[in-house]
């Protein structure tokens, strides 16, 4: 019958495979297509050598792309071959991976639909599969993609922690800063969290890393020494995290001073909290008058503001040598300032200075990582069932891993 030939061609089936039967149930809107093979030897699934068929062990039912409005299933009585070398094995089907209840074409469509929808539920509804089935296809896609990623060299790594579920649980996220993709997600934010993430890279990849961008978080710093053989790659403490420490110090100075001024009945610092967070070159017009007034005062907050703004300028240098001088003079200034929060930031910078001025050799920041983190959070918010770490990791790699996840068809 012509329709069998048509579907055989569309499924790209080649001898010895052919479609032997098509049943369409109009009421349930299901199509059932039976696939058979001509008599003769079939290739061993392991070595490909033509072998005698031992038996037909069981029937595999494989969901394929819809035939018009009908859900379509392929039925195959699975032949097993007897290979002199590999024994009795089920044959490899040209249109479905072993163990999957979906054809490669259906898996490919599912992957594309989930990526386009950005929600698993939305895609599952469109494809008429369950959430668990969608998750199974995603898991297999991620495993496939990770297998193909092994040859990639990543020069610049980013490491960051992220609080998920309202700050009650942390994960460590390892990223490829240039490729803007998530490489690994591990539970918690300990030294082991990062070591485990780095151990997923092979030897060539480990050797190919030039520098790692991270916050000043001691466990992560130690993980670099632990996971890399000497000489370890450069660590670059992220400039935005460092400036954030100065912003926090400034806010602490302001809060303290607001309290002491209030005791004298003064309100000099009223409404400044937001204004202080801006870099001076980005200050909105509405805050200009209050910042000018602050700078003209002899308040401790004014001194803190000057320190914060001056620290930001340390990254404007072109050479490590001049930048280092600038940082050292800033540290001395912070220590003399009499402002405890800034003295603390000064000591922290003094302790890590080498890993801060490494920026002038490797000008990387966690900026691209922040972008990926916020995309990840929106994917996670849109989904559900990411409570378990393994599922969370799988979703992160599926949506933001930049993986090549498509099943490859075997023809001929
Ligand atoms: Zn064999």
Image (cartoon, rainbow, N blue to C red):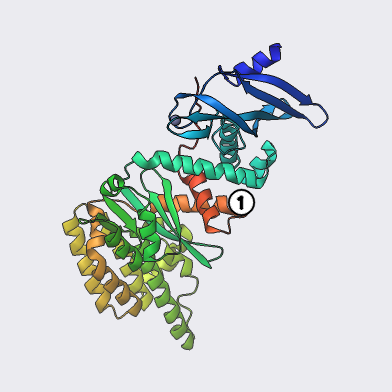
Q: Residues within 10 Å of mark 1 (few under 14, many from 20)?
A: some
In the depicted structure, whether residue 138 falls above or below residue 322: above
Residue at 32% x, 47% y: name it. Answer: 202
Visible in this render: residue 402?
no
Residue 349 screen position, x and y as percent: 27, 68
Based on the displayed image, in which of its 4 quarters is residue 306 positioned? bottom left
305 shown above or below 171: below
Residue at far bottom of view: 263
For disc 1, the marked residue is: 383
**Residue sitting farthest toward the left:** 321
Foreground pick, 307 / 209? 209
Residue 255 % position (x, y) = 45, 78
Position of 34 with respect to 191 (left or right) is right
Q: Is residue 348 left or right of residue 161?
A: left
Image quadrant where residue 213 sits: bottom left
Cβ at disc 1 under 8 Å from ligand 1: no
Name the residue nearer the viewer: 285 or 106. Answer: 106
User: Residue visible at 72% across and 22% down?
Assistant: 22
Rendered location of residue 65, percent (x, y): 65, 29
Q: Is residue 164 above or below residue 64?
A: below
| Element at label 1 | loop
Q: Is residue 4 above or below residue 183?
A: above
Q: Position of residue 75 (x, y in %)?
A: 67, 29
């Amino acid at each position: 019958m012509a329709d069998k030939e048509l579907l055989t061609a569309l499924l790209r089936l080649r001898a010895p495979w052919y479609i032997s039967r098509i049943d369409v149930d109009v009421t349930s809107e299901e199509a059932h297509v039976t696939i058979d093979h001509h008599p003769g030897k079939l290739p061993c699934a392991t070595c490909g050598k033509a072998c005698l068929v031992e038996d037909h062990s069981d029937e595999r039912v494989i969901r394929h792309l819809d035939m018009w409005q009908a859900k379509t299933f392929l039925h195959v009585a699975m032949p097993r071959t007897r290979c002199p070398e590999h024994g009795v094995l089920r044959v490899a089907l040209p249109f479905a991976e072993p163990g999957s209840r979906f054809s490669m074409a259906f898996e490919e469509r599912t992957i594309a639909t989930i990526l386009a929808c950005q929600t698993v539920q939305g895609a599952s509804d469109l494809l008429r599969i369950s959430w668990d089935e969608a998750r199974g296809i995603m898991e297999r896609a991620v495993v496939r993609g990770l297998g193909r990623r092994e040859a990639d060299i990543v020069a610049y790594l980013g490491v960051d922690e992220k609080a998920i579920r309202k700050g009650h649980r942390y994960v460590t996220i390892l990223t490829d800063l240039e490729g803007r993709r998530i490489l690994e997600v591990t539970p918690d934010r300990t030294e082991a969290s990062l070591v485990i993430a780095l151990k997923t890279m092979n030897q060539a990849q480990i050797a190919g890393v030039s520098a790692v961008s991270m916050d000043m978080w001691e466990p992560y710093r130690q993980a670099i020494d632990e996971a890399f053989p000497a000489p370890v790659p450069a660590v670059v403490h992220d400039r935005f995290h460092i400036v954030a420490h100065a912003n926090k110090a400034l806010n602490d100075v302001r809060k303290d001073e607001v309290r002491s001024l209030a005791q004298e009945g003064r309100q000099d610092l009223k409404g400044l909290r937001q204004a202080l967070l801006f870099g001076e070159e980005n200050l909105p017009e509405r805050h200009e008058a209050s910042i000018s007034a602050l700078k003209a005062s002899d308040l401790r907050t004014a001194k803190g503001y000057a320190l914060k703004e001056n620290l930001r300028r340390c990254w404007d240098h072109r050479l490590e040598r001049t930048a280092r001088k600038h940082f050292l003079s800033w540290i001395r200034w912070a220590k003399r300032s009499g402002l405890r929060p800034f003295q603390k930031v000064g000591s922290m910078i003094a302790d890590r200075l080498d890993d801060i001025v490494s920026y002038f050799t490797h000008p990387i920041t966690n900026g691209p990582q922040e972008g990926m983190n916020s995309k990840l959070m929106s994917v996670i918010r849109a989904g559900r069932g990411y409570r378990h770490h393994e599922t969370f990791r799988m979703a992160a790699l599926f949506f933001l891993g930049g993986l090549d996840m498509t099943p490859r068809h075997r023809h001929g």
